[in-house]
Image (tube, rainbow, N blue to C red):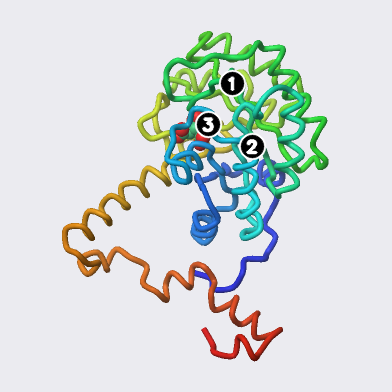
Amino acid sequence: MTDAPLTDAPMTLRRQLAGDALVVAPGIYDALSALIATQAGFGSLYLSGASIAYTRFGVPDIGLIGMSEVAETLTAICDRVPTPVIVDGDTGFGNALNVIRTVRTFERCGAQAVQLEDQAMPKRCGHLAGKTLVPTAEMAGKVKAAVDARKSEDFLIIARTDAIAVEGYEAALDRAELYLEAGADVLFVEAPRDRVEMDGIVARFGRRIPLLANMVEGGKTPLHDAAELQEIGYKIAIFPGGTVRALSRLLAEYYGSLRQHGGTGPFLERMNMFDALNGIIGTPGYLARGRDYDGSNFGGGA
Ligand SMILES: C[C@](O)(C(=O)O)[C@H](CC(=O)O)C(=O)O
């Protein structure tokens, strides 16, 4: 665990994708989760729209969160960790012109990739029923707008189709084909329902473009670990919601215990105590830096 601000520049997501290993990006929702995931050794992170909706606003993943709210969260994360962040751009928050603003904003905030999906509003989590889509040509135009809007080639455009549940499997692959032609750097075919469908996605696209697999605990796609996803032929695996699924259980247990016992004693062994949490946050390093500039105010030590 580090107590110094994390400053080393890790390998860009684009370079990671050029390597042999599967890129595993755990879900994050704020700078603390980004810090802890980075300290756990992950080389890329997935800023999940669902997780921002759940943690910050306590609302479902149905398109209620705005672009500025995601941008603010992303900025706090990219200011704190150097780890490449893939940001969930939902539908791009509107039409192709909104996509241009979204891409420019998220790139400026420090993300290395944005994920854009072909749902119509009201959008919803890809593993919920009742999704609707924008026309294929409209989404292809949004992908092209995103590609044209980025400043750096190291900012990747991840095109997602939610069509399997709406138009069927073959139609979803045909949509993905057009998003590839529109210039996407990565394809994300959301919610394949079994291994056969996953294999079919890889068979059609795996040699031409990196593919992203989305592991949602309790969702429509069977869960696989990183080794299995690599063997299937995926190039990136995101585990977007697992963080908050684990956290929500922990919080319920913690609050239940505090309520029951009137104190935190029975829960202490499951906590990071004062010094441990300050170690994660990097408090001693910050204070030492303060002393470098201002010994009178920061002289007290960590
Ligand atoms: C990837 C996703 O868009 C997200 O917001 O993290 C969600 C995941 C989830 O709801 O757990 C999705 O639509 O799959």
Residue that badge 1 annotates: 161
Q: Position of residue 167 (x, y in %)?
A: 53, 8
Figure check: 29 above or below 92: below
Q: Position of residue 280 (x, y in %)?
A: 49, 68
Splitting the image into 4 quarters, where does residue 290 fall? Answer: bottom right
Horizontal arrangement in the rendering, residue 85 relative to residue 104 (left or right): left
Q: Secondary structure at mark 3?
A: loop
Q: Is the CB of the residue bearing disc 1 within 8 angstroms of ligand 1?
A: no
Residue closer to the observer: 106 or 9: 106
* Of callouts 1 and 3, the N-terminal one: 3
Horizontal arrangement in the rendering, residue 102 relative to residue 74 (left or right): right
Residue that badge 3 annotates: 64
Q: Secondary structure at mark 1?
A: strand
Residue closer to the observer: 230 or 44: 44
**Cα separation between marks 1 and 2:** 20 Å
Q: Position of residue 55 (x, y in %)?
A: 45, 45
Residue that badge 2 annotates: 67
Q: Are marks 1 and 2 in contact (CB under 8 Å)?
A: no
Horizontal arrangement in the rendering, residue 132 relative to residue 259 (left or right): right
Residue closer to the observer: 102 or 17: 102
> In this view of the protein, can residue 284 be seen by the observer?
yes
Q: Secondary structure at mark 2?
A: helix
Label 2 environment density (alpha carbons within 10 Å; few <14, some 14–19, many ≥20): some
State the residue at coordinates (29%, 63%).
270
**Cα separation between marks 2 and 3:** 10 Å
State the residue at coordinates (52%, 39%).
238
Amino acid carrying label 3: it is: Leu
Label 1 environment density (alpha carbons within 10 Å; few <14, some 14–19, many ≥20): many
Which of pointers 1 and 3 indicates the residue nearer the eye? 3
Figure check: 32 above or below 284: above
Label 3 environment density (alpha carbons within 10 Å; few <14, some 14–19, many ≥20): some
State the residue at coordinates (58%, 9%).
171
